[in-house]
Amino acid sequence: MTASATMASGRQVQEDILRAAAQCFMDRGYAATSIDDVARSLGATKGRIYHHYRSKADLFFSVYRYGMQMNFDAIRPLAESSSDVLEKLRNMAKTHSLAMIRTQAFQRCVWEGVELLQRGATTPEQRDALVELQAMRDDYAEIFRIVLEEAKLDGIAQYQRSSIALQLMFMCLNSPLFWFRADDGSDDETVDRIASQCTVFALRGLGLKEELIADV
Amino acid sequence: MTASATMASGRQVQEDILRAAAQCFMDRGYAATSIDDVARSLGATKGRIYHHYRSKADLFFSVYRYGMQMNFDAIRPLAESSSDVLEKLRNMAKTHSLAMIRTQAFQRCVWEGVELLQRGATTPEQRDALVELQAMRDDYAEIFRIVLEEAKLDGIAQYQRSSIALQLMFMCLNSPLFWFRADDGSDDETVDRIASQCTVFALRGLGLKEELIADV
DNA sequence: AAAGGAACATACTACCGGGTATGTTGTCAA
DNA sequence: TTGACAACATACCCGGTAGTATGTTCCTTT
């Protein structure tokens, strides 16, 4: 009983740290965030964090992984559903955009993690960790790419280079990451409207006809 | 003669520093870039840079301003032309996207500058400088917004909230900033094709009919 | 109840990077 | 020719930060 309570609170502590870290990394960026910042936002000190994570990079990577895991959990059931391509594409796009808003801090860390790899991650171990996370992210994008190609074959979507089309679609769906502020109008209604407009824009961009998008 | 030569080389030196700084800031981000990095990439030392710029922030802001100036120079003549709305919108969008690719390093700094302001810029003076630059950027976006609203009134474009539509359009046009690599296929042909696809995607997203986009 | 360890806090080190103070060299004007 | 200044390079200072080493407290297990 006490053991399970301890374990549960142990997990809770980890999640608290991840959440605080995600927020700090979003607010100031990876390089400009100090471990002390994260600890202070928890009302704690370094010791707390270094007890659970080996380094600043390790903490950041955990945030990255956690964010990607949430994305997979949200999208995989939709991708594996038996809906037709159109329905699948619309659902996945909308769900992804909603996830970007709802888990903004984590997804901003994912974004910066991608940039960290594009640049030169310092140590080789960090590079290895980033490469693995990047592979996770590529797998996620691959789910969308497959649906996209199928939509193109069905004549629903039209685009030239599929890699660029994928990038552009994600740019639209991810867009709220960069300008959405959680404090102003963060009721579900508003959030849904924002995600809708982003999704419609993305699907239009992919060449979907207006009547196929109307109810998004 | 020698005086003008000195002045000219003086300007050249400034531009060299700005270019090197833009590249470094793009490669590693503002916080992770040291003045020594910039100096080293110039085959020089700190002294060279601090002789021309008062601080790291000042250097960064100069890169920001220089990048925005290039954007204005490219877009203003188009916005002031007597073309109809459709032609104006297409030209401006395509030109902007091309500029993002061609002056990538500077535009990445503009992007990060916007983020720096959204976050809390340290000193008040830095904040003031960033606010002024942000105003410059808002003025630039305003040029596009006006054309957009006109296009909507003409029934050419369709969207809900114009602020979000503007964001989404820029996200698409700016997209190459984040995945384009200058080293691979950087011939004009390829660059033009990329900008085209981004522009088509953006215009579609804004609700333009297919026949109005065909020749972009 | 005693020992061992989990879960931290505190105190410290080492280094890096922004900024400055000072030295050096070439150029130009009087 | 000389002094003054531009255009740097060199040497140095110092604050901040990642990481570590060492307490301290409480809980759990036997």
Image (cartoon, coloured by chain):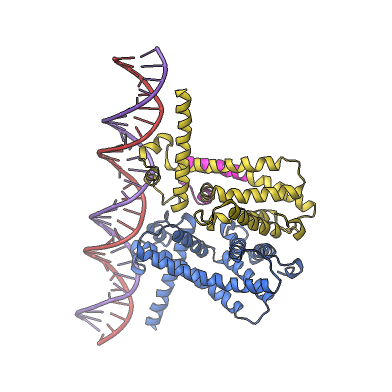
Chain colours: A blue, B yellow, C purple, D red
Name the foreground residue: B136 vs A38.
B136
- In the figure, residue B53 lies in which quadrant? top left
Q: Position of residue A193 (x, y in %)?
A: 67, 64
Screen quadrant of the N terminus of chain A: bottom left
Q: Which image quarter holds the C terminus of chain A?
A: bottom right
What residue range appears in magenta?
B113-138
**Residue B135 appears in the figure:** no
Q: Give the residue displayed 79% in from the left and 51% down from the top.
A: B153
Q: Is A123 one of the magenta-colored residues? A: no
Left or right placement of residue A123 versus residue C1 in this view: right
Residue A130 versus residue A80 in the image, above or below = above
Residue A32 locus on image (x, y percent): 42, 53
User: In this view of the protein, can residue A79 be seen by the observer?
Assistant: yes
Which corner quadrant of the image does residue D24 belong to?
bottom left
Tell me if residue A48 comes above or below residue B139 in the rendering: below
Image side of residue B211 versus residue A112, left or right: right
- On screen, B98 above or below A199? above
Q: How many numbered discs sit on the rendered protein?
A: 0
Is residue B134 within the magenta segment? yes
Image position, residue B35 (x, y; %): 39, 44
Name the main secondary structure of what is drawn in magenta: helix
Judging depth in this view, the residue of C15 and B122 nearest the camera is: C15
Residue A155: x and y in percent read 71, 71
Relative vertical location of residue A201 with respect to residue B36 in this rendering, above or below: below
Judging depth in this view, the residue of B1 and A49 nearest the camera is: B1
